[in-house]
Image (tube, grey):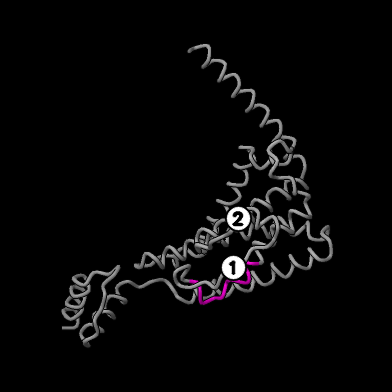
């Protein structure tokens, strides 16, 4: 058993050294880094669209072929359905096939292909993860006070959108210097995709900021007024007893 464990550790060490050397070579190739990180960002953006919005029937084959079909989103999919996101989601998914063409990644499904090793290299994954965490941290810092809500679904939707923003920003930063190398059709497609997504995301950001920092005290007192007016209130995420207590305290101050 000790011999087997020793041999396994030796094998793991050799593999780690090999990956470290591959990463060193990868890091020296700026062009390849841009390709890999832009593809990783776009792939993660697609993945989170699919998972967050419960979009059915999206397969890896669809992404490679560029024949995805996005159904009309409803509140069952996302609270952001009123923003008509179907077009930019469709463009995001179909942008994958464009990148595959431009980067000559058609053979990525082959596990022995050299390029796939970069995507699975732990050191590459860690570097990309750091990029993502940095982007996410900056977004949370900028929107932090607007991301709180007493409604779990609302707070979840806000935080999910921040994740989408983060992956999109990484993609956009990585792809900028590559667009001039693309074929005319793919270059125009990408530019339109970026323009439309920028516009839609700015609309969402404006709404998040316009919503303002939540004032839970004010919200509870408003709900209490509705209840006193005879309107049936569901105190989801709020505490009726706390609202009554705040109201009584307010009256004492007035006296």
The mark found on residue 70 in the picture is: 1
Give the residue displayed 18% in from the left and 73% down from the top. 245
* Residue segment shown in magenta: 80-90
How many numbered discs? 2
Circle 2 sits on which residue? Answer: 59
At 22% across and 88% down in the image, what residue appears?
229
Above or below: residue 97 compared with residue 87: above
Residue 40 coordinates in the image, percent (x, y): 65, 50
Mark 2 surroundings within 10 Å by alpha-carbon count, few (fewer than 14), some (14 through 19), many (20 or more):
few
Percent of width and height locating residue 4: 53, 15
Residue 35, given in percent of the width and then of the height, sits at 73, 50
Instruction: Assign a secondary structure to mark 2.
Output: loop
- Residue 133, compared with residue 238, is above or below; it is above
Towards the viewer: 94 or 182: 94
Q: Is residue 195 left or right of residue 255?
A: right
Q: Position of residue 112 (x, y in %)?
A: 71, 35
The stretch drawn in magenta includes residue 81 = yes
Left or right: residue 107 versus residue 230 is: right
Going from N to C along the chain, the mark reached first, 2 or 1, is: 2
Residue that protrudes farthest toward the bottom in the picture? 229
Q: Quadrant of the C terminus?
A: bottom left
Assign the magenta stretch its main secondary structure.
helix
Out of 251 and 234, give the one closest to the viewer. Answer: 234
């Amino acid at each position: 058993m000790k011999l087997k464990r020793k041999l396994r550790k030796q094998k793991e060490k050799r593999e780690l050294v090999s990956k470290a050397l591959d990463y060193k070579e990868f890091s020296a190739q700026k062009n390849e880094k841009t390709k890999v990180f832009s593809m990783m960002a776009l792939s993660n953006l697609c993945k989170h669209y699919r998972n967050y919005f419960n979009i059915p029937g999206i397969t890896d084959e669809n992404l490679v072929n560029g024949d995805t079909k996005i159904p009309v989103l409803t509140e069952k999919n996302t609270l952001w359905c009123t923003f008509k996101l179907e077009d930019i989601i469709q463009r995001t998914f179909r942008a994958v096939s464009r990148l595959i063409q431009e980067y000559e990644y058609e053979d990525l499904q082959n596990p022995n292909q050299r390029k796939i090793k970069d995507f699975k290299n732990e050191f590459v994954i860690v570097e990309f993860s750091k990029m993502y965490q940095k982007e996410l941290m900056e977004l949370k810092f900028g929107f932090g006070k607007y991301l709180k809500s007493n409604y779990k679904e609302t707070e979840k939707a806000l935080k999910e959108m921040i994740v989408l923003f983060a992956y999109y920003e990484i993609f956009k930063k990585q792809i900028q210097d590559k667009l001039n190398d693309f074929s005319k059709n793919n270059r125009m497609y990408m530019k339109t995709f970026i323009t439309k997504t920028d516009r839609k995301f700015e609309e969402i950001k404006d709404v998040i900021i316009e919503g303002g920092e939540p004032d839970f005290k004010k919200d509870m007192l408003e709900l209490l007024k509705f209840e006193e007016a005879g309107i049936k209130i569901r105190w989801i995420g709020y505490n009726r007893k706390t609202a009554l207590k705040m109201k009584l305290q307010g009256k004492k101050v007035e006296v």
